[in-house]
Structure formats: structure tokens, C-alpha cells
Amino acid sequence: MTDIRASIAYRLHPLHGILLAFPVAGFSGALASDITYLNTAEIQWTNFSQWLITGALLFGAPVLLWALIAFVRHRRDRLKGARLFYFGAVLLMWIAGLVNAFQHSRDGWSSVGTFGLVLSVISTLLALAAAWVAFSLAGRTEVAR
């Protein structure tokens, strides 16, 4: 008796990839504007950071939901660890971004500081890690049982 196994390719849905690009760009842009604010003390840079963080959170929410559904739906496949890491990175990215948004909503002169900059760095690194995992999984195949 032969064992017939089908090969299933993991692919990143194009809409998921587009939505994931917004938190990467938004959190990275907020980090750049935070650094610029700390070097120039021009208050407009904090406003720019607030809008970038808000946009990243707005587009990051469907990415988080999509990652949760994908993890729950495919929790028994061989890519379970990568899906769990991806979901965890997106979840932590979104939480750090939300705390960062609260931090940036404070008074302009105290909004960034060390804590705001650290939150921006954490949000950016988690967004980049999530995108790296999501796009590196695309094209991989697994054997269905």
C-alpha cells in the first residue's frame, strides 16, 4: 500500500502582505521622526509620529486578526512554530504601538523622551521581524497528511 501525500504551498495573501506593509512603514517612520524630534526639538515631529503610529495601528489591527485566524486554523501543520512566532510578533508589535500611541499623546515636550523612543524602537523591530517571517514563509511547501 502506498502513502499518497499532497504538497501544500504556504502563500501569503496579497491583501495580507499589503496590510502588513503599513505597520512596517508607519512604525519605522515614527522612529525616524522621533529621532529627528530629539535632535531638533521641533514639536511638529511629535505630531507626525502620532499620525504614523495611529496609521500603523489602524492597519495593524486586521493583520493581527488575520494572523490569529491563520494560527488557529493551521495549528497542526509543520509551520506551527513559525505561525506562532508571527502571531506573537504582531501581537507584541500592536501592544507596544498602542502604548507608544498613549505615550505620544502626552504633552509635546514630554511625549518622546527615552521611553517613547524605546517604544518606537521595539515597535519597529517587531514589525520588521513579523514581516521577515511572513514573507520568508511564502513559497514554502509542506506535506499534508
Image (cartoon, helix red, strand yellow):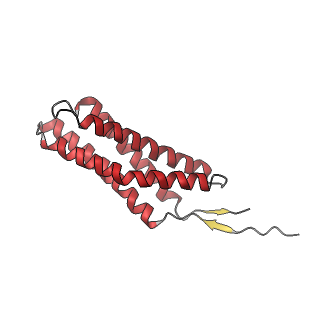
Above or below — where is 59 with respect to 38?
below
Task: Choose between 128 and 13: the one closer to the eye.
Answer: 13
Q: What residue sits 78% from the left and 69% below the top?
A: 4
Check the picture and name the quadrant holding the C terminus.
Answer: bottom right
Percent coordinates x, y for residue 7 in the rendering? 67, 68
User: Which residue of the protein is positioned furthest toward the right in this rendering?
Assistant: 1
Number of numbered labels in the structure image: 0
- Asked whether residue 28 appears in the rendered view, the answer is no
Where is residue 39? Give x, y as percent.
15, 37
Q: Is residue 128 left or right of residue 55?
A: right
Query: In the visual, does 53 lie left or right of 45?
Result: right
- Quadrant position of residue 8: bottom right
Work out whether residue 143 can be spotted: yes
Q: Which residue sits at x=31%, y=38%?
A: 100
Percent from the top left, x then y, of residue 38? 18, 35
Q: Quadrant of the N terminus?
A: bottom right
Q: Nearer the viewer, residue 137 or 43?
A: 43
- Report the residue at 42% width, 61% height from top: 17
- 22 versus 4 height, above or below: above
Q: Is residue 81 left or right of residue 40?
A: right
Residue located 70% across and 69% down the image: 6
